Amino acid sequence: MPQTLLNYINGRWAASRSDASLERENPAIGEAICSFADSGPEDVAAAVEAAAQAHQTWRFVPAPRRAEILFRAAEIMASRKEELSRDVTIEMGKVLKEARGDVQEGIDMSYYVAGEGRRMWGQTTPSELPNKLNMTMRQPHGIVAAITPWNFPMAIPCWKLMPALVTGNTAVFKPSPFSPLSAYNLVRILEEAGLPPGVVNLVFGGDQTGAALVEEPRVNMVSFTGSLEVGREIAAYCGRYNKRLHLEMGGKNAIIILDDADIDLAIEGAVWSAFGTSGQRCTAASRMIVHERVAGVFGDGLVARAAALRLGNGLEAMTDVGPVVSRPALEKIERYMEIGRDEGAAVACGGSRASGDGLDQGYFFQPTVFTDVRPQMRVAQEEIFGPVTDIIRCSDLEEAVAINNGVQYGLSSAIYTRDISKAFKAMERISTGIVYINAGTIGAEVHLPFGGTRGTGNGHREAGQAALDSYSEWKTVYIDYSGQLQKAQIDRPEGEA
Ligand code: NAD
């Protein structure tokens, strides 16, 4: 019997008020793995109420003490890495070694943020007046709604919850209906690590549950990772009600390969970036912008490698590429095959569902390379979110950068070149939030900021010190120990105009 996952509100595990539930299946084999609460507005309201109550005390717990709990959570995660990783694979399909990377990123983020509990520095500065000191300190927003996608079901919730908690916020966490198991595992760990009731609350559910959470008047900040369409809706709502908002959305990431590049290295990076996690990373490279002099050799190499990738259940050691997350995802990718062909792109390999050899019950799509792609085609502009990449020819660095920057998204880009001045020019001119030199478009480290420009984000960043800025606001403090009224800008030292 698959397990039933309950909401976690004010330190108690409970079914949704309506008792409604949803199911999640394993996308590799199409079998149900768990059911979980389908929460309505009343469940959301109860979770927000718990977070509001808990915030009254949590914000005054010294940050180093808050951080100790997060450190313990990291320790528990590390001790259970293997079982947590298997659950990631079972519920969203990525191959086990990548699932281990997902969990490791969650562990790294938790340790990193735990260290911040003892830093969380503000500034002290001299005053323009004597006997006066000025300083800044961080303050939490209050109640943070963390709304997450399914493609990094351990890493992304940790990216959000850990910095939100260490800075003194309380949270309501609404995970994707495609990855409830990892959300449950993470919140169980936080409970076990000693997080007081109400500090983190978990409400399972679909898109309506997320919308109800955004619209809950007591939610002060929304931290959302997901699609551009949903992010824009949330942004409109938050704008109207002046809620703090952190958005991380889609990508149409590119690798530029110049004619002086190490082509074998570029092919390695392209295969990993385009087909890792079945192309379902926000940073997946879905465009290869290749100098016309090397487009043939690069394309042949990429196609040969793509065609040789082994599809299968991510739990099996021989599998290179797992399923995509769901039937609608598979159907969306299929529609893009038609769109691409209609626009005049050629399918050099893949192009359809994969079947046979244990694949028939799951959602498998063949690794696909489109050639003859022009920059303005829909397959070169829109996020397909599957194991599909394009080859677009260019004639020099300037044109490559223009193509790279000519999409509505701005998450991650890469360039392969042996020419150091071209590498630096590219670094400067590429307008995405993340740039890799002689490496693929994926592979973030938690102590650096992560996020995108233009349609990918709203100027905030996950991870690194930047995460603290997302989850806190500055308070400016003036301390006057002169014992008299001193007027800034008006009282000047003797002799000054
Ligand atoms: P999605 O937008 O469909 O859903 C994301 C989350 O939002 C889910 O929990 C969903 O239930 C919830 N949701 C949906 N409609 C909502 C609404 N109206 N109000 C509030 N919540 C709502 O995205 P997805 O399919 O889960 O994830 C894939 C997308 O996420 C891709 O576009 C990918 O690029 C993006 N992504 C971006 C990053 C990044 O850091 N930039 C990282 C991972 C994934």
Image (cartoon, rainbow, N blue to C red):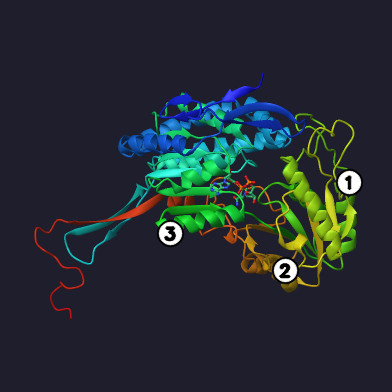
Q: Residue furthest bottom?
A: 497
Cα gap from disc 2 to disc 3, whole angstroms: 35 Å
The earlier-in-sequence mark between 2 and 3 is: 3
**Residue labelled with disc 1:** 307
**Badge 2 is on which residue?**
403
Q: Nearer the viewer, residue 117 or 475?
A: 475
* CA neighbours of label 3 inside 10 A, class few (<14), some (14 to 19), many (20+): few
For marks 1 and 3, the one nearer the N-term is 3
Q: Nearer the viewer, residue 412 or 483?
A: 412
Image quadrant occupied by the N terminus: top right
Q: Quadrant of residue 479?
A: bottom left
In this view of the protein, can residue 268 be seen by the observer? no
* Earlier sequence position, callout 2 versus callout 1: 1
Q: Residues within 10 Å of mark 1 (few under 14, many from 20)?
A: some
Q: CA distance from mark 2 to mark 1?
A: 27 Å
Disc 2 under 8 Å from ligand 1? The reply is no
Q: Which mark is residue 240?
A: 3
Q: Which three-letter amino acid code belongs to the residue tagged 2?
A: Ile
The residues tagged by marks 1 and 3 sit, at their Cα atoms, a distance apart of 49 Å
Give SS at disc 2. Answer: helix
**Which mark lies nearer to you, 2 or 3?**
3
